[in-house]
Image (cartoon, grey):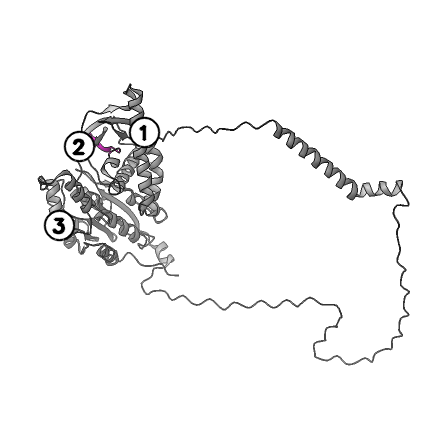
Amino acid sequence: MQRITRIAFDYNNPEKISLLEQYHSLLLLLKSHLTDRTFSILASPKLIDNNQYLGWYTNLEGQPLLLDRIADKSHKNKITKTLQTRINDIENAIKLMPLSGEERSLVLVWLPRIKSLGNQIYVINDEPVIVNTFEEPVLPAVVPVIPPKPFWRWWHFLLLALLLIGLLGILWYLFCPFGKQKLAVRHPMAVVVVKKPEPKPEPEPKSTPEPVSEPKDTVPEEPTSTAISEPKPKPKPVPPPAPKVKNPPNCITKEEMNKEPNPSKMAIVFDNSPSMTVTLNESPSEVERYFRYLWDDYGRNMSEEEKIKYEKRMTRLPTRLSSSKSVATSSIDSIQPNIDISLVTLTNCPAADVSPFYKYTNRVSLKHKIKQLTPSTTDEAGTPLYSGLEKASKILDGITRDDYILIISDGEDSCTRNNICTLANYIAAQKPRLKINIVDIAGEHKIDCIANATGGKVYIAQSPQDMIKQMNNAVSSLKINRPICQ
């Protein structure tokens, strides 16, 4: 790949970092659904020069030239038309893609950015390439065209208004009480009032006194009437008593959680290295062959078309990363509310990234952070597992309370030669109440010593079904998924 240009990049700006990660996710999503020619309009960004610059790369060969510097208008219009055709192809492909809710939201956010007038457009052998500025999208203003109304329509509305006023006046004159009084005064003979003869009162029948009877303990009958009486309101049914809730034997009460002065904490060490982009639908031997292809020039005899097809097959969904994200976010929901969780991310060498602890009320943000993880494409990309384990142990107690670490990884450390088994033994000696479980996606048993030293367990997961089962087992064995008593 050749570099088109480089742009200064603020690596300490979390918003810029988030946009870069989202763009990487978008490229991974679109690549397998677009033709190579259509996908070529999207340049690939990489952090370079100690993360001070963002380099934009492409597979196209030739001298890149800014579209705005092309003087020939017909040539420029031709390139612009090609660019619009490529964008239309992307939009049409997206309509046919089976997208999840999260993927659809990502596409809807980034389509306006791809079409933004603020992007830099380069041309390589008459092929346009978009260099995204990661700024707010600038879309062309659309001025609505209002057709002039013919003059005769004004007379039409004026006549309708006059007719309506006249009609309202007539109705008011005929039905308003004040108008009727005036009509009766001016024309006294116009209104003839016919009075109906009043009925003669019938003589009241003489009533005979009824004998006084002793009161009985009976309910007096209601007097009957020839008029239809309103039905009596039916008494509201009394709801049955709520059934008693049968709680599971291992549930935890809210009082028990509130009384705990020093509740446990947990750290999730999540592998976000490039090797996690490999599909879970291939055998371990085929995955090992793919890694030799990437690192040992194993595919030097393959044509460019064969390489593209091979890479698409080996990175198709579900990948190690997509499955790990899915099961990790679902497992977080089952962890007790009184346990705060920190996320330790393994993305770049030499050190891991550590987040603050997320409380139960903020776990939505934690799950969102996991879903947004994207492997780095820089030369520093790797798996700093030694650093991640060391940092995770430092933010946990493990002495006066039970604390936990859950490692989700597909291999050993690729950033240092320090012995991670020695580190695990040291942690176990210093923090005897710190327990570490491992979900091993590669199944190579290279880091089993971490769990063995701390009394934890290793769970092998090499398929989507295994991922769900083994992640649940890993959380369950830590005994931090007790449900709340109802």
Residue 97 x %, y % = 31, 45
Circle 1 or circle 3, nearest the eye? 1
Which mark, by number, is residue 286? Answer: 3
Q: Counting other residues with Cα less than 10 Å from the Cα at mark 2, is it few (<14), some (14-19), or many (20 or more)?
A: few
Q: Identify which residue is drawn at 33% across, 30% down.
A: 135
- The front one of 48 and 26 is 26
The quadrant in which residue 62 appears is: top left
Q: In this rendering, would 71 be left or right of 49?
A: right
For numbered disc 3, what is the local secondary structure?
A: helix
> Which residue does the numbered mark 2 point to in the structure image?
1
- The front one of 133 and 307 is 307
Sequence-wise first label, 2 or 3: 2
Q: Is residue 438 magenta?
A: no
Q: Measure how far apart labels 2 and 1 are at the Cα level.
A: 25 Å
Report the label total: 3
- The front one of 133 and 117 is 117
Which mark, by number, is residue 401? Answer: none
For numbered disc 2, what is the local secondary structure?
A: loop
Image quarter (top left, top right, bottom left or bottom right) of the C terminus: bottom left
Q: Counting other residues with Cα less than 10 Å from the Cα at mark 1, is it few (<14), some (14-19), or many (20 or more)?
A: few
- The region drawn magenta spans 40-50
Image quarter (top left, top right, bottom left or bottom right) of the N terminus: top left
Amino acid on which the number 3 mark rests in the picture? Glu
Amino acid on which the number 2 mark rests in the picture? Met
Residue 67 x %, y % = 28, 24
> Which residue does the numbered mark 1 point to in the structure image?
81
Q: Is residue 252 above or below residue 268?
A: below
**Residue 377 appears in the picture as rendered:** yes
Q: In this rendering, would 433 be left or right of 420?
A: right
